[in-house]
Image: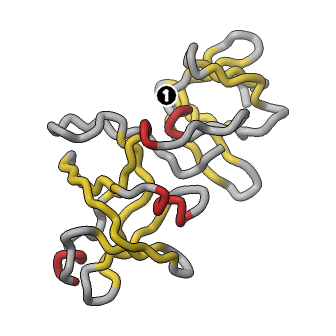
Amino acid sequence: MKPADQKPIAASQAGVPADLVPMGFVAGAFGIRGWVKVVSDTEYADSLFDYDTWWLGRNGNWRAYRVEEGNRQPKNLSAKLEGVTDRDVAHGFKGMTVAIPRSAMPPADEGEYYWADLIGLAVVNLQGESLGKVDNLLSTGANDVLVVKDGQAERLIPFVGPVIDSVDQVAGVIKVDWGLDY
């Protein structure tokens, strides 16, 4: 599974891709020449550098920025965005979401899934009982966990072989070996 690909963004601004997926956020300015510090929510932090253009936004307002240069830091990334040459401008990006269009991402390997592709899928147990829909995912270190919501109830279901029977993205269903009373 490719962690960090969170809930897809519903972009309605003209010219903004409709399939943006959050991949991290800007934590602030880095240095004095307009670089930004980015916290990546991807499986491999520097995989964000696989994309030449990042979409930065907040409150439904998005803008594309070409990445001129980038470096991996001990706990995050630093990036030089085209047209940003001043620390004060870079600092203004603090808190913005960094997103990539889902259509720009490579296909997932066999048996792997982007989190963004699992969010919203129905979860049904082997008895055919509905457990709700995937609202989010968590990475615990040991394994990933589906956060499944059904009305007010919330279930945490480990995304591991013995529990996950099948994932049918076309049908929009994850079948699990999990009881209603768990």
Q: Residue at x 47, y 77 (%)?
A: 71
Across and down, in percent, residue 75 comes to 54, 77
Across and down, in percent, residue 154 comes to 56, 35
Which colouring convention does the figure follow? secondary structure
Q: Residue at x 34, y 55 (%)?
A: 53
Estimate how packed mark 1 is, as few (under 14), some (14 to 19) or many (20 or more) residues with alpha carbons within 10 Å: some
Please state if 4 lies on the left or on the right of 129 as rendered. Answer: left
Q: Nearer the viewer, residue 144 or 38?
A: 38
Q: Is residue 92 above or below residue 7?
A: below
Residue 179 shows up from this direction: no
Please state if 83 lies on the left or on the right of 39 as rendered. Answer: left
Q: Quadrant of residue 31?
A: bottom left
Q: Nearer the viewer, residue 49 or 93?
A: 49
Across and down, in percent, residue 88 comes to 17, 81
Q: Label 1 is placed on what type of residue?
A: Gly
Residue 160 shows up from this direction: yes
Q: Is residue 13 above or below residue 79?
A: above
Q: Quadrant of residue 177?
A: top right
The N terminus appears in which quarter of the rendering? top right
Across and down, in percent, residue 59 comes to 21, 50
Q: Is residue 139 above or below residue 29?
A: above
Please state if 110 lies on the left or on the right of 75 as rendered. Answer: right
Q: Which residue is the site of mark 1?
A: 120
Q: Quadrant of residue 130?
A: top right
The kind of secondary structure element at disc 1 is: loop
Q: Residue at x 62, y 35 (%)?
A: 155
Q: Residue at x 30, y 61 (%)?
A: 66
* Residue that lies at the very extreme toward the top in this rendered image: 128
